Image (cartoon, rainbow, N blue to C red):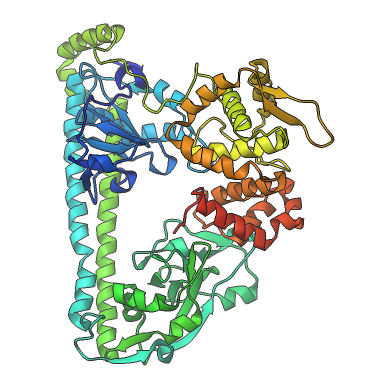
Amino acid sequence: MRWPTVPLKEIAPAQTPNIRFSPDEPVWHLTLDQVESHTGNIVNKKIAPASTAGTSTNVFDDSNVLYSKLRPYLNKVICPTEPGIATTELIPLRPRRDLLDRRYLTYYLRSKHFLGFANVAVAGVKMPRIIMAKFWKHQVPLPPLSEQHRIVEILDQANALRKKRAEADAIAGRILPGLFYKMFGDPATNPRGWDVVLLEDALADTRNGLYKHGDFYGRGTQILKMFNIQSGELELSRVDRVELTEDEAEKYALTPGDILINRVNTKELVGKCAVITSDLGPAVFESKNIRVRLKPEWATPEFVAHYLNTTFGHAALCQGVKHAIGMATINNTDLRRMAIPRPPIELQQTWDGLVRQIRESQKSRRKVCERLDQLLDVLLHRAFTGDLTVKWRVAHMKELLAEMEAQAKALDCPSTQSNSPEVGSKRHAGHDMFNKAALAAYITDRCHAPDRPMGRVKLAKLFYLVQQKAEIELTQTFMKRAAGPLDDEIHKFLSLAQKSKWLVLCRGEGDLKPVKPGATVSKAVEQAQKLLGPAKAKVDEMLDQMKGWGCRALERWATVLDASFELTAAGQPATVEGVKDTIQRHPDWVPKLSRDEFSDTNIEATLKGLRGFGFITNQD
């Protein structure tokens, strides 16, 4: 017996409940930061007055399944048990109760089967999102309801085991901090009266890391970056590689017992550190980190690293932090001049031994967790291919056939749920070209001045910046042309706008090809306002500031922004050197670096401006 497959929109349309919260009513405010990947468990639940939620939100209740449409969080799926207010990045699906078990849909959306589809159905550069037209057309396997219930029952049992294991791990994760305070006392008060010395007394060597051009990356020796330091340990699930000379390999080598300290990051994350362990293998470290080697008779690596990772130790290390363009930096002088307690070396050595034992135990627990995750993945795969319940299905075949017949009739009938429009829908007649034309006309109308004609090149730059500011998914890929980023279809939608009398494409005057509002531009403005939604006010503010800018300034902003998105996608911060490296990797863009507009000073100022406008944020 084969299950039918049904488009997602037919069995779980986007629909919010008809709930109205009073302004002062305490309500659950749900954001993506509260949701664990894969499990959907909620952490740091926020309850606040409904009036503080803002406008870019959706209401939900226990009839919804919430699905994240952003690429980094495609496996964040929530099955809420109470009402609340969610960010609009979470799509509020409402499964048809006559056809679909809400828990079955939740497990399906978390499965690798669906995640594989979702990963290739995304578009966008800044924060890629799933293409909603593809999302709603996706075919969901739909067994009879009783079989869905049986699948959920089995998966719930496996998930309960994984949850218990995670709770035990969370308790175990509190052992080391508690043990440190028990052995050495509170670093803030030093109740044991340990001698306090300058860290430089314990240092054998410190060195800033290696900078290499992007062309050397992708092969060769492991190189640890700032994202490889997480929660006081090395995070090695992703390690980049770089080609080295013999001198570089020797000069920047990491050996067991070295401490790696992050020297450039946000104010909160700068100074995080971890000890290099013997299972790392040959590796070097990049320029945003500092390598510290200790005098073994003075201090041990695990004691110093753990002290620096405490709240008090981190604050002491960051006292002299330097700030520039949203990033914080510490240097070797800051490191050497900080004060640190000096317990007896024998006690420190005992601590290091205990840390190694506990970390080995943690590794064993992680392997158990990985096996439980693998088990659930196998069960999820079997569940949605029909293998998981095959014996049960044979035993209940007669009832299932009757259910499937009723199911087919239900699918032929419209849902009894209200047919509300798609939440967050920004399409008009299903055609992005129409919306692109309307948006181009809106920008022109907003920025046009009779004494200062605007050209098509400037319009293209503003069009790119507006799409990114409003996070609109009209253009899937902006091409890196010489003056880009550029939508290759710009001539098509400008022609459509002119045909609709929204725009007038004037005859060229030298290098300038002017564009001005057309006779019926008000219709385009009305459509664009719907398209922009809550982002309209911010877009208008941006356009009012930028309409007097020249093409070259706008080109720099658009280029630096596009390069910043590429760096963010690679897990790297947007810095001047990172932007220049990114531009170097694209042949059509390389000539930009020879122009004054792309000097280090101008790129740095542009990054600062982009952060001020909210285009990019600080990043770990």
Write the residue at 22% across / 80% down.
186
Residue 57 % position (x, y): 33, 36
Please tell me whether residue 531 is drawn above or below residue 556 in the rendered image.
above
Q: Nearer the viewer, residue 344 or 3?
A: 344
Left or right, 322 with respect to 306, comes to right
Residue 562 % position (x, y): 59, 46
For the N terminus, the image quarter is top left
Q: Nearer the viewer, residue 251 or 339?
A: 339
Q: How many marks?
A: 0
Residue 318 appears in the picture as rendered: yes
Asked where in the image residue 377 lies, by quadrant, the reply is top left
Residue 541 % position (x, y): 52, 42
Left or right, 158 with respect to 304, comes to left
For the C terminus, the image quarter is bottom left
Q: Residue furthest front?
A: 451
Q: Nearer the viewer, residue 489 or 446?
A: 446
Residue 305 appears in the picture as rendered: no
Residue 214 % position (x, y): 63, 58
Please tell me whether residue 455 is drawn above or below residue 612 in the rendered image.
above
Left or right, 601 with respect to 595, comes to left
Write the residue at 32% across / 18% down.
420
Write the residue at 31% across / 80% down.
303
Write the residue at 73% across / 36% down.
451
Asked where in the image residue 501 lies, by quadrant, the reply is top right
Asked where in the image residue 607 lies, by quadrant, the reply is bottom right
Please tell me whether residue 494 is drawn above or below residue 281 in the rendered image.
above
Left or right, 589 with respect to 191, comes to right
